[in-house]
């Protein structure tokens, strides 16, 4: 599918790279520009340990924080495929467009391997993702898509969350890796080459949770040399702020903090400029003057 929809996709090299924090931060920035933002999380595995999310329908929790940051309720098109884990965690109930559709195995790290899912359920999931993206594109000025787990951790043809959904949306991807985590830099390089072989449009990368600034040039150089990708910037290690109590108000403050850091480091500005969602400083000064 070809689209002229504004937006981009955040994919991670490995689970736990911090793509959710970046997603909500970008949503807050774009909302501050008074844009209608549609969060698109094609496949998610619900975190049952999350006690902050107030959604009574568990399938909605997979995209709750993305939608909350975008000032939107969770609708089926924001979370077309969601899995609610069973007590043991090895499998769960899959919800497609908000309706239960049976039990599926959970591959781990917030991912579903659709090669292990029945043909009927896979077909339903594929159709729901296609329809959901069209609905997001119709309703929003910008679509912010977020993948699941690590792109390349399972075979692309079985990975609807990252590869299939990205082919459907054709939104350019930003790859994210946790800079200080062992194995994440090689995973970032590998994810890029797997994505490129699968025909996904990858635009650049972010190094997240940088613990030691002096290591950044070497890490950045390794990725750039191996991929030729644009370096959008880096983000510091962001913990919970003092006084964080897990409430929704505190979560909103944390989301805003992510957005502020994205702008303060210029990482967010670089991404938004690349995708035509931000003016550079000189153009903004002229616009404001007129």
Image (cartoon, grey):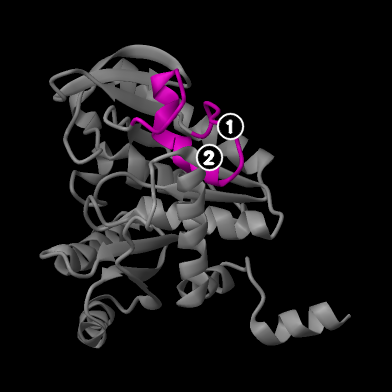
Circle 1 residues within 10 Å: few <14, some 14–19, many ≥20: some
One can see residue 61 in this view = yes
**Can you say whether 81 is above or below 148 in the image?**
above
Q: Secondary structure at mark 2?
A: helix
Residue 73 covered by magenta stretch = yes
Decide if residue 118 is in sight here: no
What residue appears at the point 18 percent right and 62 percent down from the top-left corner? 187
| 2 and 1 marks in contact (CB < 8 Å) | yes
User: Dot 2, how many residues are within 10 Å of its Cα: few (below 14), some (14-19), or many (20+)?
Assistant: many
Left or right of residue 239: residue 259:
right
Of the pair 246 and 136, the residue shown nearer to us: 246
- Please identify the residue farthest to the right as the structure is shown: 290
Q: Residue 245: x and y, percent?
A: 38, 43
Q: On the image, numbered disc 2 is attached to which residue?
A: 67
Which residue is at a point 67% across and 39% down the rendered structure image? 139
Q: Is residue 87 left or right of residue 55?
A: left
Whole-angstrom CA distance, mark 2 to mark 1, is: 6 Å
């Amino acid at each position: 599918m070809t689209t002229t929809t504004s937006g981009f996709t955040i994919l991670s090299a490995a689970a736990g790279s911090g793509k959710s924090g970046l997603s909500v931060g970008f949503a807050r920035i774009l909302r501050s520009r008074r844009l209608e933002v549609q969060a698109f999380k094609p496949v998610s595995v619900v975190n049952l340990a999350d006690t902050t999310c107030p959604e009574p329908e568990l399938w909605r929790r997979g995209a709750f924080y993305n939608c909350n940051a975008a000032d939107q309720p969770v609708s089926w098109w924001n979370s077309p495929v969601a899995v609610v884990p069973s007590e043991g965690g090895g499998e769960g109930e899959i919800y497609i467009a908000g309706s239960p559709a049976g039990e599926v195995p959970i591959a781990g790290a917030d991912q579903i391997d659709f090669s292990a899912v029945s043909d009927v359920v896979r077909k339903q999931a594929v159709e729901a993702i296609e329809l959901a993206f069209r609905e997001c594109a119709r309703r929003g000025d910008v679509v912010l898509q977020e993948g699941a787990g690590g792109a390349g951790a399972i075979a692309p043809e079985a990975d609807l969350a990252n590869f299939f959904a990205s082919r459907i949306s054709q939104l350019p991807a930003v790859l994210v890796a946790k800079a200080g985590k062992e194995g994440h830099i090689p995973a970032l390089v590998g994810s890029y080459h797997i994505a490129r072989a699968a025909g996904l449009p990858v635009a650049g990368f972010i190094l997240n949770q940088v613990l030691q600034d002096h290591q950044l040039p070497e890490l950045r150089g390794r990725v750039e040399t191996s991929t030729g990708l644009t370096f959008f910037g880096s983000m510091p290690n962001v913990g919970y702020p003092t006084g964080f109590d897990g409430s929704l108000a505190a979560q909103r403050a944390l989301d805003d903090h992510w957005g502020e850091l994205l702008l303060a480091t210029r990482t967010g500005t670089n991404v938004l400029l690349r995708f035509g969602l931000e003016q550079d400083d000189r153009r903004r000064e002229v616009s404001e003057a007129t």
